Image (spheres, rainbow, N blue to C red):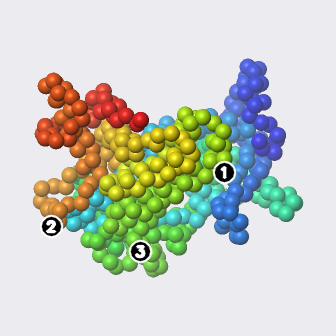
């Protein structure tokens, strides 16, 4: 609860009379455009980013706000969401209904595979901002929200609750009050939408999206669309063919964003390029960014060679960490309950982002061995079949991609086939994400045909040639659902 000592249970159990009084209060706030001063008093708590923090960089400040104030901003956020959805472009997948970080992971996976397969240069510049949410100027937020077409009357109410705050923080047992002059409030439901709108305006000013009808442009041309950047909240990835374009774009963005309080963290901003790309350094205002062989983006590790070894190691560590966090709590429960807890915690940790993986047999075996060890150590009965589990996730995700709106970047890149004039590189092509999907569709249709001929069983010998592309079959939700449910996890 905030400094006003009003907790959520008071509002939940206050009854109809309290709700009516709150509604009148909120309407008055919108009419006057003034926020109660008590709601602007923020209790600041420092959360440790890592054990035993030594500097301010090792902690994250979180605003503990007034509960009635959060209810008010939640209402404003819902009214803002419709305007924000029509204002934001397809590059932003953070803080938006029906979108997830898996879309960005899928886009990078398939783009990297196809650029490698067809000898196309690809440079990904991963931009990191220093404390973006806490640093952005409110004036930049206000300009973006007004440009989005949000009601100015509502805007005044939101402005008053963000612009004139006072934070109270306890340091060495003493309470210190400090004015909050910049940033959007951590913990407020309106902050993500406000930040996304402000960043969208800044990027459109510094790095407008290329026109699809131009022959030469920055970004990668995919089925007539230029894909030039990906966003998830403040995590920005620039997509380019050469270092010159990457440097120019990053420098322009850094210059414009700095005026709004957003500073590039050049120490954490990295460049990942494939073997076909020029090796010249990418520079931001003359300062070179570090080239890396692998990078962690949205929780998943991407490698220059496209291999999953580092990501598999990362998922195995996450699985053991999840197990040790609940090991003492599941000792006294039944095997059935243990199995349930391990699937919901350990298996979830080990399969994060697995719908976007392009796995080899050895990758599956490594994770299956870890799952077996954990289930044996926990005495939780029969461990799940990881191959079936991950394939079910992947097939469900593949169907979701195909049924996305046609303008979604994730769908465009996944279904993209380079034009006939572009030749594949020599030698045996590497396995692609889509290969597993195509194989499973063939097996599924083969089994259906066998059943129609009086046969049965899940045979993989002598597969009947599939005449229907997997993407066409996936458009039928009922047919694809039958395929997904054919994977038994027991």
Closest to the observer, 240 or 367? 367
Going from the N terminus, do you reach mark 1 or mark 2 first? 1
Q: Quadrant of residue 61?
A: bottom right
| Mark 2, other Cα within 10 Å: few <14 / some 14–19 / many ≥20 | few
Q: Are marks 3 and 1 in contact (CB under 8 Å)?
A: no
Circle 3 sits in a helix, a strand or a loop, which is it? strand
Residue 323 position within the rendered picture, expressed as x and y whole percent measured from the top left: 57, 50
| Mark 1, other Cα within 10 Å: few <14 / some 14–19 / many ≥20 | many
Q: CA distance from mark 1 to mark 2?
A: 53 Å
- The residue under label 2 is 426
Q: Residue furthest top?
A: 16
User: Which residue does the image show at 62% across and 48% down from the upper left?
Assistant: 327
Residue 131 position within the rendered picture, expressed as x and y whole percent measured from the top left: 60, 62
Q: Nearer the viewer, mark 3 or mark 1?
A: 3
- The residue under label 1 is 185
Residue 269's label in the rendered image is none
Residue 291's label in the rendered image is 3
In the displayed structure, 321 sits above or below 29; it is below
User: Which residue does the image show at 25% across and 41% down from the upper left?
Assistant: 440
| Mark 3, other Cα within 10 Å: few <14 / some 14–19 / many ≥20 | some
**Quadrant assignment for the N terminus:** top right
């Amino acid at each position: 609860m905030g400094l006003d000592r009003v907790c959520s249970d008071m509002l939940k159990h206050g009854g109809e009379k309290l709700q009516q009084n709150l509604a009148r209060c909120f309407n008055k706030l919108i009419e006057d455009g003034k926020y109660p001063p008590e709601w602007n008093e923020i209790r600041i708590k420092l959360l440790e980013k890592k054990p035993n923090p030594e500097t301010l960089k090792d902690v994250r400040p979180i605003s503990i706000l007034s509960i009635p104030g959060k209810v008010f901003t939640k209402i404003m956020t819902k009214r803002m969401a419709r305007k924000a959805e029509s204002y934001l472009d397809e590059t932003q997948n953070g803080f938006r209904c029906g979108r997830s970080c898996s879309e960005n992971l899928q886009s990078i996976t398939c783009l990297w595979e196809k650029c490698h397969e067809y000898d196309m240069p690809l440079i990904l510049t991963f931009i990191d901002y220093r404390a973006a949410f806490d640093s952005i100027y409110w004036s930049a937020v206000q300009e973006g929200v007004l440009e989005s077409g949000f009601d100015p009357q509502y805007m005044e109410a939101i402005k008053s609750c963000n612009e004139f705050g006072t934070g109270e923080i306890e340091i060495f047992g003493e309470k210190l009050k400090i004015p909050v002059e910049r940033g959007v409030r951590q913990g407020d439901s309106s902050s993500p939408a406000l930040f996304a709108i402000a960043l969208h305006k800044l990027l459109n000013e510094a790095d407008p999206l290329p026109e699809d009808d131009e022959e030469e442009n920055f970004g990668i041309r995919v089925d007539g669309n230029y894909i030039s950047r990906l966003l998830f909240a403040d995590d920005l990835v620039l997509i380019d063919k050469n270092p010159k374009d990457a440097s120019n774009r990053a420098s322009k963005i850094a210059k414009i964003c700095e005026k709004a309080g957003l500073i590039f963290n050049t120490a954490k901003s990295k460049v990942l390029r494939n073997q076909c790309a020029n090796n010249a350094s990418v520079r931001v205002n003359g300062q070179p960014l570090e080239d890396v062989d692998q990078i962690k983006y949205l929780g998943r590790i991407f490698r220059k060679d496209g291999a999953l070894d580092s990501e598999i190691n990362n998922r195995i560590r996450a699985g053991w960490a999840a197990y040790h966090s609940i090991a003492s709590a599941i000792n006294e429960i039944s095997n059935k309950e243990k199995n349930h807890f391990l699937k919901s915690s350990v298996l979830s940790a080990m399969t994060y982002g697995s719908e976007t993986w392009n796995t080899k047999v050895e990758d599956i075996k490594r994770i299956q061995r870890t799952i077996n060890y954990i289930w044996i150590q926990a005495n939780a009965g029969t461990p799940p079949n990881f191959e079936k589990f991950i394939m079910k996730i992947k097939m469900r995700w593949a169907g979701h991609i195909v049924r996305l709106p046609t303008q979604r970047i994730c769908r465009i890149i996944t279904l993209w086939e380079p034009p006939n004039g572009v030749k594949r590189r020599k030698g045996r092509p590497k396995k692609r994400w889509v290969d597993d999907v195509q194989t499973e569709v063939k097996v599924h249709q083969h089994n259906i045909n066998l059943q129609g001929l009086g046969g049965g069983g899940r045979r993989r010998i002598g597969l009947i040639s599939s005449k229907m592309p997997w993407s066409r079959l996936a458009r039928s939700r009922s047919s694809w659902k039958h395929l997904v449910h054919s994977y038994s996890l027991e």
